[in-house]
Image: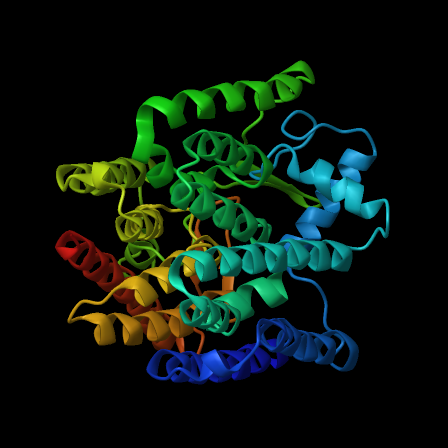
């Protein structure tokens, strides 16, 4: 409960500052140095309280990185000798970091340094293309976003690295460096996770003839060392010290299938869920191309990225707030660039959505995994506030769908 309380405080403060930044120009009075010191130091104050005074510990995912990294240091090969859903090269990057200090906190620090570099670079790109005020507002809205602080600061997800690559993708798009987009997209897949395709597909499709071939060529180059070592490259299982989780058969919280399985006690067919996911994906892609996507408007690309990610979160069984936090830069920039009559609605929805998803009760309350007999997360109905937990999951689902619809409406009106 200590961690939940700390995250609640962070989310409340972050929501207040976000609303303040959206409704005023106070960031204009602050220098970039001050912005970054405030934006990245305040999370560490509470991190120190957690680790030093409350006997805190790194999260389960960070413990997984630690376990897998030490396996690689012992000479084992990812997705040959052990199973991992992360990019093939992630554990080798982690191994290099562990040569300095073999401790998962070192990974947390490294990931956040990469995140900081990405935010700094992106703020410079935005300042050059859209002005200092928008750039400074972006820094404030990103650094104090409830979902960013709650999940990135404490959980140390490997998705932190995507912020740096997101900055490179947006820079390449604005500078019309199409050839770079293909290489960056391939690196994201094989370094971080296959779900990063949600972030790169819209950029790749802005110039199919140039981006796709380079993406495929870069992928072949990156795959070769893994195949040479006998790895299957991509994995959908997770090896733990206690056993192996099959991520394709587990129904995680935060999507429609989780609610169906818990409310109606219906054992969902994961193949059916995959069919719905593919259909939703194709629908989103079709709608964007049917609206003359070739205009290459940045707003449309940002909306496309977010909607693909929301499509995944709504209909996939493998979901996490960590998959949503990676699109915060895209949504923030979309909100700042959007000047439609629904701008105020979009701004408020963005803040509420960030707050609700950041406090996903599935992470903290009494949820357990039946991996042997019933392979999905199940809420213990004897838990006193089971109804509140389910209501929170419904709220998350509703906000994800609402944001999807609103983004589509906003982008479709953008000329």
Q: Residue at x 72, y 36 (%)?
A: 92
Report x, y in % for residue 78. Answer: 67, 30
Report x, y in % for residue 83. Answer: 62, 34
**With 177 as the anchor, is 99 left or right in this view?**
right
User: Which residue occupies the foreground of this view, 223 or 380?
Assistant: 223
Q: Residue at x 56, y 55 (%)?
A: 121
Report x, y in % for residue 49. Answer: 72, 80
Report x, y in % for residue 331. Answer: 36, 60
Q: Residue at x 74, y 45 (%)?
A: 67
Residue furthest toward the top?
A: 228
Quarter-of-image position of residue 192: top right
Please tell me how many numbered marks the rendered image carries: 0
**With 414 as the anchor, is 211 left or right in this view?**
right
Q: Can residue 359 be seen?
A: no
Quarter-of-image position of residue 381: bottom left
Q: Can residue 123 be seen?
A: yes
User: Which residue occupies the foreground of this view, 53 or 325?
Assistant: 325
């Amino acid at each position: 409960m200590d961690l939940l309380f700390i995250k609640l405080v962070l989310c409340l403060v972050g929501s207040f500052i976000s609303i303040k930044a959206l409704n005023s120009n106070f960031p204009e009075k602050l220098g970039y140095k001050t912005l970054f010191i405030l934006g990245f130091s305040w999370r560490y104050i509470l991190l120190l309280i957690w680790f030093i005074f409350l006997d805190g510990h790194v999260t389960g995912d960070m413990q997984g990185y630690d376990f897998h990294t030490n396996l690689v240091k012992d000479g084992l090969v990812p997705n040959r000798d052990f199973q991992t859903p992360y990019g093939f090269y992630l554990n080798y990057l982690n191994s290099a970091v562990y040569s300095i200090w073999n401790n998962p906190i070192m990974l947390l620090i490294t990931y956040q340094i990469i995140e900081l570099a990405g935010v700094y670079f992106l703020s410079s790109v935005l300042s050059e293309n859209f002005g200092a005020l928008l750039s400074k507002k972006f820094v404030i809205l990103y650094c104090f976003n409830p979902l960013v602080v709650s999940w990135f600061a404490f959980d140390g997800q490997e998705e932190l690295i995507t912020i740096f690559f997101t900055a490179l993708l947006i820079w390449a798009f604005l500078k019309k460096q199409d050839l770079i987009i293909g290489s960056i997209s391939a690196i994201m897949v094989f370094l971080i996770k296959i779900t990063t395709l949600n972030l790169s597909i819209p950029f790749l499709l802005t110039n199919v003839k140039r981006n796709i071939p380079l993406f495929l060529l870069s992928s072949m180059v990156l795959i070769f060392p893994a195949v040479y070592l006998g790895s299957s490259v991509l994995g959908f299982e997770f090896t733990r010290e206690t056993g192996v989780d099959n991520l394709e058969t587990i129904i995680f919280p935060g999507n429609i299938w989780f609610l169906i399985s818990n409310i109606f006690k219906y054992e969902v067919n994961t193949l059916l869920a995959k069919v719905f996911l593919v259909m939703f994906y194709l629908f989103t892609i079709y709608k964007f191309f049917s609206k003359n996507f070739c205009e290459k408007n940045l707003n449309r690309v940002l909306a496309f990225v977010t909607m693909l990610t929301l499509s995944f979160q709504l209909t996939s069984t493998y979901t996490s707030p960590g998959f949503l936090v990676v699109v915060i830069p895209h949504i923030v920039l979309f909100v700042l660039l959007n000047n439609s009559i629904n701008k105020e609605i979009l701004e408020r929805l963005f803040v509420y959505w960030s707050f609700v998803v950041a406090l996903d009760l599935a992470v903290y309350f009494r949820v357990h995994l039946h991996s042997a007999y019933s392979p999905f997360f199940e809420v213990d109905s004897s838990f006193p506030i089971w109804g509140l937990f389910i209501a929170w999951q419904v709220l998350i689902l509703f906000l994800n769908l609402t944001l999807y619809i609103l983004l589509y409406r906003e982008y479709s009106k953008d000329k």
